[in-house]
Image (cartoon, rainbow, N blue to C red):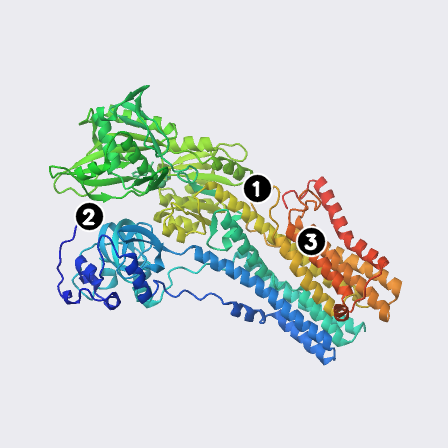
Amino acid sequence: MQKHTDTASGSTESENGASPDAATKFDAWHTLSVDDISGRLNTDQEAGLTSAEAAERLKRVGPNSIAQAAERSAFSILISQFKSLIVGLLLVATVIAFAMNEQIEGAAILVVIFINAMIGFFTEWRAEQALTALQRQTVPVAHVVRDGHEHEIPAQDLVPGDLVVLSAGTRVPADGRILEAVRLQIEEAVLTGESVPVTKTSEPIAEDDAALGDRLNMAFLGTTITDGRGRMLVTSTGSQTEVGKIGTLINEVVARTSPLEQQLAQLGRLIIGVVLILCAVIVLAGWIRGTTDFWHMMEIGISLAIAAVPEGLPAATTMTLALGMQRMARTRALIRRLPAVETLGSVTVICTDKTGTLTRNEMTVRTIVVDQRHFQVTGTGYEVEGTFQEGNQTVEASANESLVQALQIGMLCNDAAIEREGDETTVLGDPTEAALVVVGEKGGLDRDALADQFPRIGEIPFNSDNKRMVTVHQTSDGQHIEFIKGSPGSLLADSQHHLRDGQAVPLTSEDRKYWEEQNEVLAGAALRVLALGRRERAEGDEEGESGNLVFIGLVGMSDPLREEAKSAIEVCRTAGIRTVMMTGDQQATAGEIARQLGIDHDHDGRPLRLVHGKELVDLDDQRWEQAVADAGVFARVSPEHKLRIVAALQRQGHVVAMTGDGVNDAPALKEADIGIAMGIKGTEVAKENSDMVITDDNFASIVGAIEQGRIIYGNIIRFIHYLFSCNLSEVITVFAALMIGWPLPLAALQILWLNLITDIFPAFALALEPSTPNIMKRRPRDPDTPILPPRLIFLITWEGLLLAAVTLLAFAVGLNWHGSEGDGLKRATTIAFMTLALSQVFHAFNARSRNGSAFTRHLFANAWLWGAVIICVLLQLAAVNIPLLQRVLNTVPPTSSEWALIVTCSLIPVAVVEIVKHVQRMAGKGSDQD
Ligand code: ADP
Ligand code: MG
């Protein structure tokens, strides 16, 4: 880091101390020196603003946000309810009713319109709210220094003058002038269209009209930090920023329609067409046969059309997905794109990181190899208590010069910090590095003293491509020295010397072999292995130039497995989902951990392969597919490999979920069917490119989300099954009666009533089925199966026929008892109406499972369903007993023998369906359904 003492630039001194408001209008920040900038913004380069000053400025300049796409207001949702085909049809029916002087009927239809709209409104509004809440969960944050301390705050609270910390993998939260840049690389495609990251600097730039892309000392809101770190002073916020000026929305809007919803909308259009034709036929047939007059027939036809059109289906589906998404949030899976809920159910492969996801990412150094000696380190976690042992002897670390050097490098080539307050230990930064701090403390080293002795003057941060970290330090005699830690293979390859008894001696090929073997020994014990090295810097050397290292030694650290991970992997296996571990760690470590977790074999006990990253170099597409075909572990992979792995799996027909955390993972996260970002360890950019964020970074949460995805999809199928069979039964009942030459078994308003009652309570209750037994014991759903596969169509058809048959049966008995004239007919239609209504209500139990019995111990699992049944029964009782409803619906209270007829007939479908399911189960068919 360079300290800035230059006060070059000139020109603007007179404006020093100007108010920050005025400052935001200023447009040549890049020409100023760092000191001018902080003066002008009236802020401190080290301590930032005070919180009081920041609050004051926030009041004055307003929040740091750009107007987002407006949410749909409740009002606009309400209005849209009246713009539908159904409402149009209902209005026609109202007009007909009033024209025929049937005021009560007309008024009743208006009430239906109103109720219909309210239901539609409620459904959509609920879904909308869930989606908005979802967007709110992902508000961007900024790391800001205020009152001398670093805080994480919502990015919209930033004000001009704030001192912001920039780190790789985040978005720049406002426009600012860069004070410090350490290999800071920013990709500015949103502004400049240029996708190659630019290297930033803190030096002033002379031309005051430099193009945005050339303002190398500025960072702009919405651009992505791809590498390095830095600090900036905020110069403008919100709509004053460059992005704000052009009004671009940075956050892509959350996708709102899923393939399922699109399929449903398509299906809906098809059904509308069919239904309208069918209803026209019914109207004509009834009229020609003289069943009733034309206008009454029209009413019946329209009511049937309304009943049969599954208009609310897409909205109800959205709501089901959205509610499911909220349920998932409680199990630590935040869905970022709604369609993911449904895709989750058909995942066949999960490609997962090792560290932190399958393991706990709590590193503890166990072994250090230096001087051809193995030192074991005792202690647990990040506690300082622990000793060094050789064999069974406790040794003083300070007594061994090479060991001391290793510990020093571990502490200095390190960005982690450990904060201890009482019993609380917080790790800031990478746990791998924290472990090195702890082991240094165990060895009695003082990190602060070391840092003073070897001040850091440069660094190359770790990333998963280079797999090493380099820091440059100044020694007391003014020399520069580099400390390096990273993967053993690459360090060894760059080494010409190694350390013996504290002295650098040439590295022979035997020594090399020795180190390679030791690496294997440590890795084979499932330890994460890091090599340490140093390099004297000669005059004129490039920072981080490779070669000529002195190899110091190896450090092996353990990382306990997550207990839940093993059982979650087992669950995946029985669910037909392959777990593939992708890690930057080396083969032996990865292989041992895979063995402990059981990733090394598949569903049928066949072994899965362990693939080394170097096998993946220069493969063509076909070879890639071979490589991924039966792989369980990929070791030493780079983010770029991940992308190819995902693509190859997809070409083989897999639905791939993939985890990622770094900036480099973004393309693979995008490519995967379900990109999963880690909530804790993940970078902002990884999250933005994901479909789902796991808040606890835990593999088990992924599996939990997949289970929820399967349940939700199952529920959507349940209510589709239910709704369609009910609607069909209404159409068939009327159509069949007409064909036979009977009077109409249902009145127009009765049909509308049925449509409101059954469409709503039982259908929504089915959408809330809490779980399905054995859902994780089945193979994943093929995403290409249509929403209504032939089997389901067949089921819906015969069940619809069955419901219609019992209704017509009851109607026939009613006609037989009471005749088909006047009050007799009224009794018979009441019987038909009640039978159809109750049989539909009971049919909900059939729709809970397509092959399982409704009468198992899960009968009471869905309390919603029982609530819905009770409400529906009460409403039906009201329909025949309350005078107003009697008049509107043209009903009479049934006698006890009529009740016996109604109840018997409406229970028949449940009995028949149960018997059929039983027979099917005996025949062993349909066992793969729920
Ligand atoms: P993963 O996250 O899959 O465990 P990483 O990409 O983090 O893998 O690490 C790969 C390798 O890079 C490790 O085996 C280790 O040798 C090295 N490494 C990991 N973290 C650091 C670090 N902070 N500094 C230097 N080297 C590291
Ligand atoms: Mg890592």
Q: Nearer the viewer, residue 249 or 417?
A: 417
Does 894 sit left or right of 195 as displayed? right
Q: Position of residue 34 (x, y in %)?
A: 18, 57
The 10 Å Cα crowd at callout 1, few under 14, some 14 to 19, many 20 or more, is: many
Residue found at x 30% / y 38%: 433
Q: Three-letter amino acid code at disc 2?
A: Met
Q: Quadrant of residue 619?
A: top left
Q: Position of residue 223 (x, y in %)?
A: 32, 57
Q: Quadrant of residue 421?
A: top left
Q: Nearer the viewer, residue 284 or 443?
A: 443
Q: Three-letter amino acid code at disc 3?
A: Ala
Q: Three-letter amino acid code at disc 1?
A: Met
Is residue 794 at all visible to an observer of this figure? no
Residue found at x 34% / y 59%: 157
Instruction: Give the number of the disc on residue 844.
Output: 3
Of marks 2 and 1, the one in the foreground: 2
Helix, strand or loop for disc 3: helix
Up-down relation of residue 420 to residue 511 (above or below): below
Does 752 sit left or right of 597 as displayed? right
Up-down relation of residue 526 to residue 242 (above or below): above
Label 2 lies in ligand 1 vicinity (Cβ under 8 Å): no
Helix, strand or loop for disc 2: loop
Q: Which residue is mark 1?
A: 776
Q: Which residue is mark 2?
A: 1
Q: Earlier in the sequence, mark 3 or mark 2?
A: 2
Does 353 sit left or right of 408 as displayed? right
Q: Earlier in the sequence, mark 2 or mark 1?
A: 2
